Image: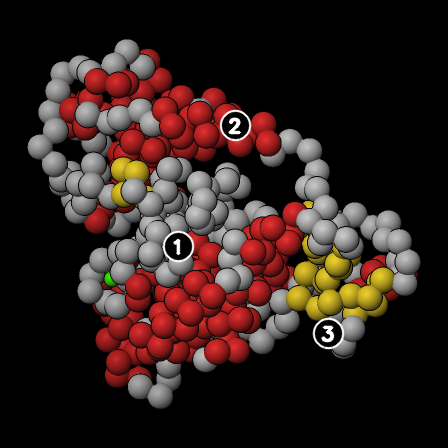
Amino acid sequence: MAISLPEPCPPPAALARLPLPEFYCSRPRQMLLAFCVILLTLGSFGCAERSPRVVPPATSLATEPLANRACVGAYRATQLTGDFAGYAGLRQFIDQMVRKHGFDEQYLLGLFSQARRKDWTLNYLAKSDQELKGTPPPGGWTRYRAKFLDERHISAGVEFALRHRAALLRATQQYGVPEEYILGILGVETIFGSYVGKDRVLDALTTLGFDYTRRGDYFRGELESFLVMARGEGLDPAAPKGSYAGAMGLGQFMPSSFLRWAVDFNHDGHRDLWNAEDAIGSVANYFIQHGWRPGHPVLTPLQASGPVSLEAGLNPQYTLAELQQAGLRPVRPCGSEGPLRLVRLRHANHDQYLIGHPNFYTITRYNNSTYYAMAVHELAQAIKRRL
Ligand SMILES: [Ca+2]
């Protein structure tokens, strides 16, 4: 979910989350049982399950229901040593975690004394930040698309869908998110769990929180969420591995997204982003909580009668009438419920335009990128055709 940093290839993962509808009423007893388990397990998160199409307020870290569990791991020190010795910002962060969340100071000093700075990540991001400046060149979509719309992704998606058919069906029924879009996210993010990252989340977030100036605030917030998550779930914070930016599991959730939107979809008492069922439910929950409208379209191709002067992208919002007045006409009736986005895909020799409906925008809440959401959509459709 949702920070737009490039991922070392393959695959460019959404760093969120990255980046939520109705219990199956034909089985009321199971429904009640499942609901009770969720309530017992997640406390205030349960309200999202009862009224899944109503977005609840984000749960604050201070009220995280499992926050009073003991920390895991025999870490203990009286000062910071190791790669981050002498980091005044980290020392302040530790003090803040003690005051705000009741962590033991010596536990955190011991933990962070064995954290490792990821110099490769810092060098990679410095280079990427430079490359990201400027407008995307012609052919950009063609090259981006080729990373994901290949036989490896599609066949892995079909295999995953067949293996987890029951969970996907349950997620579709409960949340109203079509299974192919859940599959599209998991495919683009990690090829269905075949590439979930190999960096320790602790190292990634400590490095980016205290050595990556441009987004340091964001990553320190994620590090705070990560420590709360690890304590709440009974995990040694030095154990979980993820992307170089700290995104975790099949759906590459960032820790703050875990706290707000991950669900225990297999009802074993833990939200486990590396478990396929929990990942399926969590992606569906993320979608519905970010405005997915069941039964509504995602994209509609447009025909342009001449040069297009309207600004494309995720920020400008249009009505159907405004698009039509600009010479853009949908190739099929699509409804006019907005706000609508103008999607421009840069092929090698031409630009292609589409209407991005509100559901398209929802996909971009997983990763704030038109091309990312377009790849999820196309991969979703390609897998659906094989099922
Ligand atoms: Ca679980």
Quickly name the residue at label 3.
334
Q: Secondary structure at mark 3?
A: loop
Quickly name the residue at label 2.
127
In the depicted structure, whether residue 187 falls above or below residue 21? above
- 342 left or right of 244 in image: right
Is residue 290 something one can see in this rendering? no
Residue 47: image quadrant is bottom left
Between disc 1 and disc 2, whose residue precedes? 2
Q: Is mark 1 within 8 Å of ligand 1?
A: no
- 374 left or right of 39 in image: right
Give the residue furthest to the left.
74
Q: In the image, what residue type sits under mark 2?
A: Lys
Q: Is mark 2 within 8 Å of ligand 1?
A: no
Q: Secondary structure at mark 2?
A: helix
Please provide percent x and percent y for residue 254: 39, 45
Q: In the image, what residue type sits under mark 3?
A: Cys
Give the residue furthest to the bottom.
26
Q: In the image, what residue type sits under mark 1?
A: Thr
Residue at figure coordinates x 22%, y 32% from the top left: 102
Residue at figure coordinates x 76%, y 76% from the top left: 332
Q: Secondary structure at mark 1?
A: helix
Q: Nearer the viewer, mark 1 or mark 3?
A: 1
Between disc 2 and disc 3, whose residue precedes? 2
Q: How many marks can you see?
A: 3
Quickly name the residue at label 1.
190
Is residue 143 something one can see in this rendering? yes
In the depicted structure, whether residue 297 falls above or below residue 361? below
Colouring scheme applied when the structure was drawn: secondary structure
Q: CA distance from mark 1 to mark 3?
A: 32 Å
Please provide percent x and percent y for residue 72: 13, 39
